[in-house]
Amino acid sequence: MANVTIVGVGPGSKEYLTRAAENAIYNADVLIGGHRLIEMFNSLPAEKITITAELMPVLQLIRSKTLNGNKVVVLSSGDPGFYGILATIKRHLPDLNVNVIPGISSVQLACARIGIPWDDAVLTSCHGRDILPLVAAVKKHNKVITLTGPKQNPVEIARALLAGGTGNRSVYLACNLTYRNEVILSTDLEKLATLDQSDFSNCVMVIYSD
Ligand SMILES: C[S@@+](CC[C@H](N)C(=O)[O-])C[C@H]1O[C@@H](n2cnc3c(N)ncnc32)[C@H](O)[C@@H]1O
């Protein structure tokens, strides 16, 4: 079977790119990824294909370029196996072998910045997903970490949790990690629910009981 390589590029800045990821990316014939990730490697000679909302045509390109003998590298933010593109590629392209190079997940870096362990947390995602399963998780567990999304932003999530009856909980927010506008904030659901939604994008949210 032909091999496609899926590389985790970490949360943002190249400082958090592993040497193994860098080697695979620099040796690729074809680089495929979202706009922000492709931009990171604009200066490389590899052919570049940007993933847009229409995923199926890109998946077909991944298959055909790989079967034609190209070294195809698909870029994933953070780690490909944590709400990244790995599951999608395995589901839609079962005829390809996947070679996965792990990356530092946004959750790992968020917890490192805050200075807390994450082995005792329940990990979830609201990115492009219903918030209801998170409500159930927060009611049941003392420490829940969730990825947020453009629509499911931290303010929206705080309001949904309170409306769902979780009661007030402490919150850490880690937003835009490794970028110039990185923000780490300690707050709670009630305060967060009163803020402006546009203040927060690209965040990891830790919801916990003291
Ligand atoms: C599609 S998921 C990909 C997660 C990725 N595979 C990982 O391991 O971090 C995208 C979400 O990850 C989180 N994320 C990714 N990069 C981030 C960063 N630099 N700072 C904060 N959160 C980030 C945000 O919640 C964003 O909406």
Image (cartoon, rainbow, N blue to C red):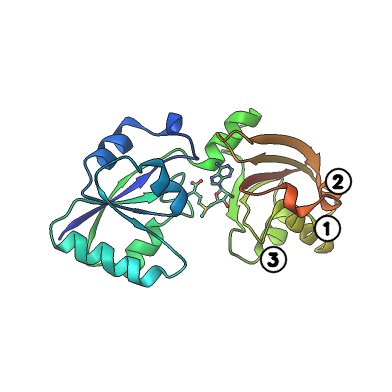
* Vertical arrangement, residue 94 with respect to residue 25, above or below: below
Question: How far across and how far down the image is residue 82, in percent?
Answer: 47, 50
Q: Amino acid at mark 2?
A: Lys
Q: CA distance from mark 2 to mark 1?
A: 11 Å
Q: What's the residue at 60%, 36% (across, down)? A: 110
Of the numbered discs in the image, which one, if any, rests on residue 132? 3
> Closer to the camera: disc 3 or disc 2?
2
Taking the image as shown, residue 189 lies to the left or right of residue 91, namely: right
Q: Residues within 10 Å of mark 1 (few under 14, many from 20)?
A: some
Instruction: Name the N-terminal-most of marks 3 and 1.
Output: 3
Q: Quadrant of the N terminus?
A: bottom left
Q: Quadrant of residue 58?
A: bottom left
Instruction: Name the N-terminal-most of marks 3 and 2.
Output: 3
Q: Amino acid at mark 3?
A: Leu
Q: Which residue is mark 2?
A: 191
Q: CA distance from mark 3 to mark 2?
A: 21 Å
Q: CA distance from mark 3 to mark 1?
A: 12 Å
Taking the image as shown, residue 169 lies to the left or right of residue 23, namely: right
Element assignment for label 2: helix
- Report whether the residue tagged 1 is closer than 8 Å to ligand 1: no
Q: Nearer the viewer, residue 112 or 192?
A: 192
- Report whether the residue tagged 2 is closer than 8 Å to ligand 1: no
Q: Quadrant of the C terminus?
A: top right
Q: Which residue is mark 1?
A: 162
Q: What's the residue at 85%, 53% (across, down)? A: 167
All told, the count of numbered labels is 3
Element assignment for label 3: helix
Of the numbered discs in the image, which one, if any, rests on residue 196? none
- Circles 2 and 1, Cβ within 8 Å, touching? The answer is no
Question: How far across and how far down the image is residue 126, in percent?
Answer: 62, 59
